[in-house]
């Protein structure tokens, strides 16, 4: 029963939706005339280009490993990947022994992934690394247990890329740590030595360091002492990566408030005690994302060793394609294939770096 | 002050004195490094004697004996090695300078694009950054080079884009025929720049005295353009252009850029722009939102907010990492050796193979890049000091 004086007012309209695909489009694509115009122009260009790309890459593409069909087709020739993928991935490693390279690489990758997970950050991780590396080199090199001997200059493709990137980073870390400590040391002679090293390396391109590794290292060694080309290149990349990593670590050292070091001195801690117990735990936690970025650039930089005749992924790809005249015209598809491999590795590393940055910053949020 | 009885006086030459320990450590460190260097130098000398390798920089004076695909000035195989190095150095700088300019423009646009109101533009910029920075630059260079040398039509049937001709032979474009008018126009531009600078000083003084804002962009632009135009007119207004045309075997005359140069430039620009975009984005994000809100509360326009409030603060964050990216681009130009562009590294590589003087040639490469890097960072440090916060 309503009283005669009661006048119901119309209900308010429902609030504007801000969720869902349609609302997203309205806010982000058509919110004003400038935005709408931009959407129309950019969308038009995309609509003109994307169908052609799809046509080339998927619809007209050839998926079977038949170069005659590839020559006749107007689209991409993914058959080249099917035909050559073992040569692209493993390069000059003996064809029948590819399983060894595969096992080794999977093992190394699993170890790297384990090292990136919190549950494995235990003291025995170092020992595990040593064991895995011994197994790795034994299995890859062979010559024992009835395995065929494979010299290091035949190691190539993706296993070599992963080996170079991970080993040089692992070895660069201790060097970088000492260089960074030296650069922020109070002793002028040590400080300037470290500064000269870092600035010298950072001032020259990696390729000149690699040239040095391949042309000059043999001259530097005592007579009759010959080191393997893989070791030389590994040393070159390590020395190069260490300089960049040292700068990242120094950034972390500088971010530690002076009060922390003074407090440690008041407690009577020695220099090394201060560094080990107070400074480094805080500084290293801060620089983990930076070191991850170093890792990504080192991973990409390993592609340069092709120039000093070690055939990692890029070099193996070039060799696999150039050695076969039938498939040579389809190098672009091969390049796209290894670009995808690099992208998957680098992108997942950068996502991991973002995750770890959030983990590190967790302690600062409350 | 007399020593207290509880603490015995410190002996200067005691292991307990920190200063003494530091001295010992440093002497040991320097000695170890010096001995290592001596040992390595001795090894090198012995090895070189044993292998009959000659050393010294005297080879720089002898005839190079190889041709260089492209150079800004004439070079033939009879000329000396040091001239070959000079050609390589100029080629490196030619790529680096143009690349830095293009990268800055492209990177800034993409970095700013990530703040666009348009979701499509935002997404595209993000995709660009993620795609191009996660693929090695060498691979990108090889792919660009492949595109230029395989996909483009033969020089006999180039793609014609207005006055531009694009083919496997590279890019041909019209250039003005050099005349006195152009020299005078350049001088006119210089005079215009000086006048514009004086005008800006005057305008700023007027603004500070009366609060009346004068245009700091359009008027100086008109002054510079007028100066250039006057110089050009005084020189007889030359309009002759060297226009390329389709010859029987190739595109002829006009200015030209080789496919090697183009792919190196394009590859380095596209790769580095992704990093510059991230630097710019970080710089803009580092300026607190309150700053732009305060600026609009004061009644500044969007352009003024960007120019007077946001950019000066963002630049402080942007400049140091931007310098690093410029240096990276310059150093990455050494990858030219992979696609056969004759930069200083590929000249040195040829020289090593011909003369066997690896030590000297590598030293030259390092010297060239070190001096470029150090001078770039000096320049950018100077600019950074100008842009830094002026504190008491």
Image (cartoon, coloured by chain):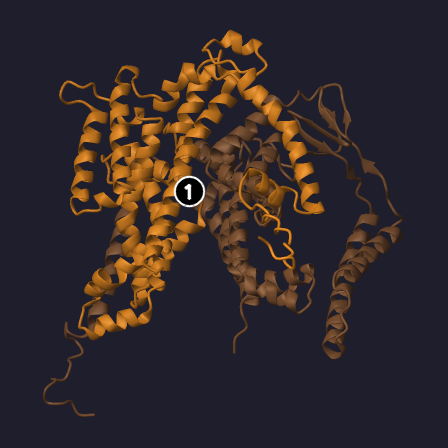
Q: At which x and y percent is residue A158?
A: 35, 28
Q: Which residue is mark 1?
A: A206
Q: At which x and y percent is residue A221?
A: 26, 40
Q: At which x and y percent is residue A255?
A: 36, 63
- Residue B196 vs A47, above or below: the answer is below
- Residue A296 vs B199, above or below: the answer is above
A301 or B391, nearer to the observer: B391
Residue at 16 percent across and 47 percent down: it is A123
Quadrant location of the C terminus of chain A in the rendered image: bottom left
Q: Is residue A219 visible?
A: no
Chain seen in brown: B
Determine the secondary structure under disc 1: helix
The image quarter containing residue A37 is top right
A14 or A364, nearer to the observer: A14
Residue at 58 percent across and 24 percent down: it is A53
Chain seen in orange: A
Q: Is residue A80 left or right of residue B390?
A: left
Instruction: Count how many numbered circles sit on residues in the image.
Output: 1
Residue at 61 percent across and 42 percent down: it is B121
Q: At which x and y percent is residue A85?
A: 39, 19
The image quarter containing residue A318 is top left
Q: Is residue B348 visible?
A: yes
């Amino acid at each position: 029963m309503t009283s005669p004086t009661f006048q119901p007012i119309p209900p308010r309209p429902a609030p504007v939706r801000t969720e869902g695909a349609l609302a997203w489009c309205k806010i982000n694509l058509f919110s004003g005339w400038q935005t709408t115009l931009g959407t129309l122009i950019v969308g038009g260009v995309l609509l003109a280009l994307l169908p052609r790309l799809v046509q080339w890459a998927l619809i007209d593409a050839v998926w079977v490993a038949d170069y005659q069909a590839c020559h006749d087709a107007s689209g991409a020739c993914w058959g080249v990947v099917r035909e050559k993928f073992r040569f692209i991935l493993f390069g000059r490693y003996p064809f029948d022994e590819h399983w060894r390279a595969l096992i080794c690489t999977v093992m190394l990758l699993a170890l790297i992934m384990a090292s990136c997970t919190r549950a494995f950050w235990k003291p025995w991780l170092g020992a595990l690394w040593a064991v895995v590396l011994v197994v790795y080199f034994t299995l890859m090199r062979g010559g024992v247990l009835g395995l065929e001997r494979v010299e290091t200059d035949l190691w190539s493709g993706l296993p070599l890329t992963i080996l170079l990137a991970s080993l040089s980073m692992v070895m660069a870390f201790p060097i970088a740590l000492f260089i960074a400590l030296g650069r922020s040391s109070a002793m002028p002679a040590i400080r300037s030595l470290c500064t000269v090293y870092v600035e010298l390396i950072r001032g020259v391109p990696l390729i000149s360091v690699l040239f040095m590794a391949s042309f000059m290292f043999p001259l530097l060694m005592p007579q009759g002492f010959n080191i393997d080309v893989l070791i030389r290149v590994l040393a070159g990349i390590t020395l190069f990566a260490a300089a960049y990593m040292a700068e990242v670590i120094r950034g972390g050292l500088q971010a530690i408030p002076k009060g922390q070091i003074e407090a440690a001195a008041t407690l009577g801690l020695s220099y090394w005690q201060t560094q080990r117990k107070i400074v480094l735990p805080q500084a290293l936690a801060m620089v983990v994302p930076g070191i991850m970025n170093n890792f990504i650039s080192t991973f990409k930089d390993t592609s340069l060793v092709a120039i000093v005749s070690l055939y990692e992924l890029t070099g193996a790809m070039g060799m696999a394609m150039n050695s076969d005249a039938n498939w040579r015209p389809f190098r672009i598809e091969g390049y796209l294939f290894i670009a995808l491999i690099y992208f998957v590795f680098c992108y997942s590393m950068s996502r991991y770096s973002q995750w770890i940055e959030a983990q590190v910053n967790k302690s600062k949020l409350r | 002050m007399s020593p207290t009885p509880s603490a015995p006086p410190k002996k200067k030459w005691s292991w307990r004195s920190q200063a003494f320990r530091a001295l010992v450590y440093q002497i040991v460190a320097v000695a170890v490094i010096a001995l290592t260097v001596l040992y390595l130098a001795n090894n090198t000398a012995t090895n070189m004697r044993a292998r009959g390798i000659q050393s010294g920089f005297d080879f720089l004076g002898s005839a190079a004996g190889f041709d260089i695909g492209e150079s800004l000035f004439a070079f033939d195989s009879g000329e000396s090695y040091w001239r070959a190095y000079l050609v390589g150095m100029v080629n490196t700088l030619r790529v680096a300078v143009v690349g830095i300019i293009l990268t800055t423009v492209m990177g800034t646009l993409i970095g700013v694009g990530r703040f666009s109101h348009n979701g499509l533009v935002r997404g595209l910029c993000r995709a660009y950054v993620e795609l191009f920075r996660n693929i090695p630059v060498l691979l990108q260079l090889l792919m660009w080079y492949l595109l230029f040398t395989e996909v483009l039509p033969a020089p006999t049937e180039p793609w014609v884009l207005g006055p531009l001709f694009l083919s496997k032979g590279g890019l041909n474009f019209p250039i003005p025929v050099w005349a006195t008018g152009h020299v005078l126009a350049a001088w006119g531009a210089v005079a215009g720049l000086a006048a514009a600078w004086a005008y800006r000083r005057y305008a700023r003084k007027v603004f500070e005295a009366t609060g009346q804002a004068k245009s700091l962009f359009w008027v100086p632009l008109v002054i510079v353009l007028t100066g250039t135009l006057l110089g050009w007119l005084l020189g007889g207004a030359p309009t002759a252009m060297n226009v390329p045309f389709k010859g029987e075997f190739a595109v002829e005359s006009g200015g030209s850029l080789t496919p090697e140069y183009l792919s190196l430039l394009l590859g380095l620009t596209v790769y580095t722009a992704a990093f510059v975009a991230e630097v710019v984005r970080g710089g803009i994000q580092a300026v607190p939102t309150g700053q732009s809100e305060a600026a609009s509360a004061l009644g500044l326009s969007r352009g003024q907010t960007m120019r007077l409030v946001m950019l000066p603060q963002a630049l402080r964050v942007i400049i140091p990492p931007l310098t690093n990216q410029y240096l990276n681009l310059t150093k990455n130009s050494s990858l030219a050796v992979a696609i056969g562009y004759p930069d200083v590294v590929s000249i040195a590589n040829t020289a090593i193979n011909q003369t066997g003087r690896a030590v000297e040639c590598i030293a030259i490469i390092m010297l060239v890049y070190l001096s470029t890097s150090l001078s770039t960072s000096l320049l950018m440090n100077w600019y950074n000091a100008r842009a830094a916060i002026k504190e008491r």
